[in-house]
Amino acid sequence: MRFKNKVAFITGGGSGMGEYTAYRLASEGARVVIVGRTQSKLDKVVGNITSKGGIAASFQCDVSDPDSVNKAIKLTVEKYGRLDYAVNNAGVSQKFNKTADLPVDEYRRVTGIVYDGIYYCMKAQIPEILKSGGGAIVNVTSVYGKKGMEFNLAYSAGKHGGHGMTKVAALEYAEDNIRVNTVLPGVIQTPILGNEPEAVERIRQGIPTKKIGKPEEVANAICFLLSDEASYITGAELAVDGGFLI
């Protein structure tokens, strides 16, 4: 019960890595708040947690809108009285385009979530975590935040930027007992991957372990970095990628 009586806030908590992180945190005693844009997905996850005796709530939130983020954090603190941990996991895929062909609206849509969203979230989360005496934040980026991804300028650039924001925040709040780290997922099994079996096989062959990752494997890394087991780790970048970045 590493997170007993603590409060954790997770963006993109209605599916995938955010969903499994919520399950893991709740199973270890945390009061979990998940946010996202689709209420039906959030309701499913909350129901799964509470049916097993866990404590969870959800709020709709668009991380590309700072007012929406501020409201979600306010509602979290009103409901549970504090904030100890945050997982900034919300993401979106980009429509494939070469750089010169990338529409400005598409660039702004993607970076608004994968880049601006991390800033909006940390800006709202940190003051509340400070009030709780400290805690931890994990920003979920991507292996493509460490290398380029063809036809994905907005996505890859936004993920690169997330690493920079993590390092700055880690430096600024190190003496305030707030640790800020990054998890870099590789290719993780999602429903979208299931629609392109040939593409998935090509990707799998390029991974040293020859395996596609599972959402729960990323959740394990996130929960480790949030926990006191990682008490001397801040500003780190932990790849969960089967060796993809080696």
Image: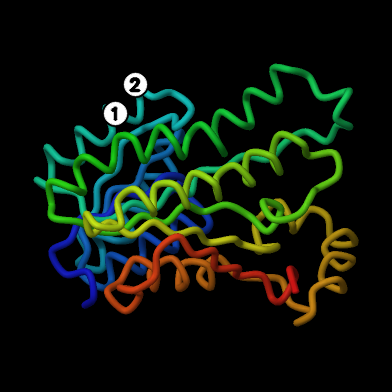
The circle drawn on residue 70 is 1
- Characterize the local packing of mark 1: few (<14), some (14-19) or many (20 or more) Cα atoms within 10 angstroms: some
Q: Is residue 139 above or below residue 70?
A: below
Which residue is farthest bottom?
209
Q: Residue at x 35, y 25 (%)?
A: 68
- Image quadrant where residue 43 sits: top left
* 126 with respect to 15 (left or right): left
Q: Quadrant of residue 75?
A: top left
**Which image quarter holds the N terminus?**
bottom left
Task: State yes or no: discs 1 and 2 in contact (Cβ < 8 Å).
Answer: yes
Calculate the distance from the C-alpha at mark 1 to the C-alpha at mark 2: 5 Å
- Image quarter where the C terminus lies is bottom right
Q: Is residue 72 above or below residue 33?
A: above
- Mark 1 residue element: helix
* Secondary structure under the numbered disc 2 in the rendered image: helix
Q: Position of residue 48 (x, y in %)?
A: 34, 60
In the drawing, does residue 129 fall left or right of residue 187? Answer: left
User: Where does the image place residue 9, in percent across and percent down from the top left?
Assistant: 30, 49
Residue that appears at 48% across and 34% down: 117
Residue under pointer 2: 67
Image quarter of residue 128: top left
Residue at the image position 86 percent from the left and 71 percent from the top: 206
Horizontal and vertical percent for residue 203? Answer: 84, 65
Up-down relation of residue 228 to residue 68 (above or below): below
The disc labelled 1 sits on which kind of residue? Asn
**In the image, what residue occupies the spot 31% across and 36% down?**
59
